[in-house]
Image: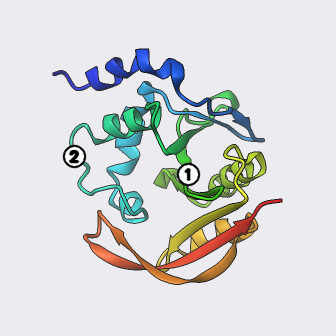
Amino acid sequence: MREGSRLDDLKPALAGAPAQPVIATERFTLRPLRASDAGMIAHYTADRRVAEGTRAIPHPLPRGASDSFVARALATDRTEDVWAIDGSDHKLAELLGVVSLTRMENEQSELGFWIGAGFWNTGFATEAVAALVAANPHGARTLFAEAFQDNPGSARVLTNCGFVYLGDAESWSVARGARVPTWTYLRKMA
């Protein structure tokens, strides 16, 4: 089986996939992932610093991992909606990072995000999270998020977007191969 064929095989099934809205911000657009994003996702997430800032991205990144990630994001039975942070309409990179919402029970969703290392400290993460929170495409009454305690920048993104500190916890980081102390956040939606 050739590498891209998993994505090609999904195309007929996508007709029944739940629609994700396109969300415009001042500097970019949040749009659903597409197969062509896999290469840039692999490029950015191959950076150890990006991978170690997440729970699920391995380092080193296995061959085909970004294709599999995109395929899961396009699946009709997905529980996570993933948006590309696309700056191409504003003379920025086509993919700056991603932001996601994972459905939980009782009208709750968990928010996640990462930004390519070359775009850190630009405000892109805050702008993307704020736009996704404002749109609230899952119609969630509560959003949850977490940040590793050695990543205060991600914690600032969350607090800048109205998330309130809930408590300390730990989460497994695949890239680190260890449990990592986290700060957990909550945002009640109107």
Give the number of callouts: 2
Residue that sits furthest to the front in the current view: 106
x then y, percent, for residue 166 = 63, 81
| Location of residue 135 (image quadrant) | top right
Q: Nearer the viewer, residue 144 or 154?
A: 144
- Could you give the CA–CA distance between mark 2 and mark 1, rounded to whole angstroms? 26 Å
Instruction: Residue under label 2, please give it.
Output: 62
| Location of residue 172 (image quadrant) | bottom left
**Quick check: marks 2 and 1 in contact, CB under 8 Å?**
no
Q: Is residue 128 above or below residue 56?
A: above
Circle 2 residues within 10 Å: few <14, some 14–19, many ≥20: few
Q: Amino acid at mark 1?
A: Arg
Circle 1 residues within 10 Å: few <14, some 14–19, many ≥20: some
The residue sitting at 33% across, 60% down in the picture is 48
> In the structure shown, which secondary structural element does the residue marked by tag 2 occupy?
loop
Position of residue 3 in the picture relative to residue 75 (left or right): left
Q: Nearer the viewer, residue 76 or 7?
A: 76
| Location of residue 113 (image quadrant) | bottom right
Position of residue 101 in the picture relative to residue 69 (left or right): right
The residue sitting at 73% across, 54% down in the picture is 130
Q: Nearer the viewer, residue 83 or 40?
A: 83
The residue sitting at 21% across, 40% down in the picture is 63
Label disc, if present, on residue 103 of the rendered structure: 1
